[in-house]
Image: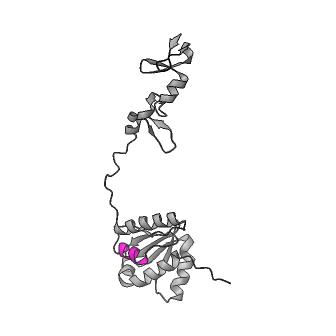
Amino acid sequence: MITCTICNGEFDQEDIRYYGDEPFCEDCFFDHYTYCSVCEEPVDRDYCRYDDSDNPICESCYEEDYDSDAPDNPIIYDNDRKEILSLSKDWLAGRRPKRLIKINHNDFRLEEIQEKVGLVDKGLYLYGLRDREEYQLMVSTNLFNRISQYTTLNNWKVTIEQDGGNNRIGISKSLRENKFEDIVELLRELTTIPKQIAA
């Protein structure tokens, strides 16, 4: 028989668990200790970490899982900061959140377009194109007809090419320079859910 370190009860070997060299009955062991879900070594509950699913993890395994490539101070653009605050307020108020259109920050004037369009109901990804003779807009399949119709109704002389993916628009440099306000209006049109008219 083996004596439990905490309750001093006597137990058979098969009913004993160990933490270090100290023996514990099962009840006392699980009151104070558990097993790491990664390496399965016993770990003191007071010094245990937990993952997103509340699985216990010892300090060593937790540190091994630490992403050293993650930046300590990531770049947050001013527009992103506004979006984060808006999303938080909408979530707390129980409203459907609005968001910014997503952009490639390296492309000319896209940040200005993103800021001018503001927060939107429907997501969209915007990227820049070099000027080309064959086309000035590159749009995903799901937006092609709508943008073609919009540009025709608004008398834009613009060549559109269909691209794969969903909710994506590439805009040539010359359009970004010369039709800035028109591009902003197009994007607002695409990303706004029409208000229901009361009967």
Q: Position of residue 139 (x, y in %)?
A: 49, 73
Question: Which residue is farthest bottom?
Answer: 155
Q: Is residue 55 above or below residue 152?
A: above
Q: In the picture provided, is 103 more to the left or to the right than 190?
A: left
Relative to the observer, which residue lies in front, 18 or 193? 18
Question: Which residue is farthest right?
Answer: 199
Q: Is residue 24 above or below residue 69?
A: above
Q: Is residue 1 visible?
A: yes
Q: Is residue 109 above or below residue 63?
A: below
Q: Is residue 130 above or below residue 197?
A: above
| Residue 16 counted in the magenta span | no
Q: At 49% from the left edge and 45% from the top edge, which residue is drawn?
A: 52
> Magenta region, mostly helix, strand or loop?
helix
Residue stretch in magenta: 108-118
Q: Position of residue 24 (x, y in %)?
A: 49, 20
| Residue 115 counted in the magenta span | yes
Q: At 65% from the left edge and 83% from the top edge, which residue is drawn?
A: 198
Q: How many marks?
A: 0
Q: Position of residue 69 (x, y in %)?
A: 34, 48
Q: Quadrant of the C terminus?
A: bottom right
What's the coloring here? one colour
Name the image quarter holding residue 180: bottom left
Question: Which residue is farthest front?
Answer: 7
Relative to the observer, which residue lies in front, 173 or 2? 2
Q: In the picture provided, is 169 more to the left or to the right than 149?
A: left
Question: Which residue is farthest left?
Answer: 73
Q: Position of residue 12 (x, y in %)?
A: 56, 13
Q: Is residue 134 visible?
A: no
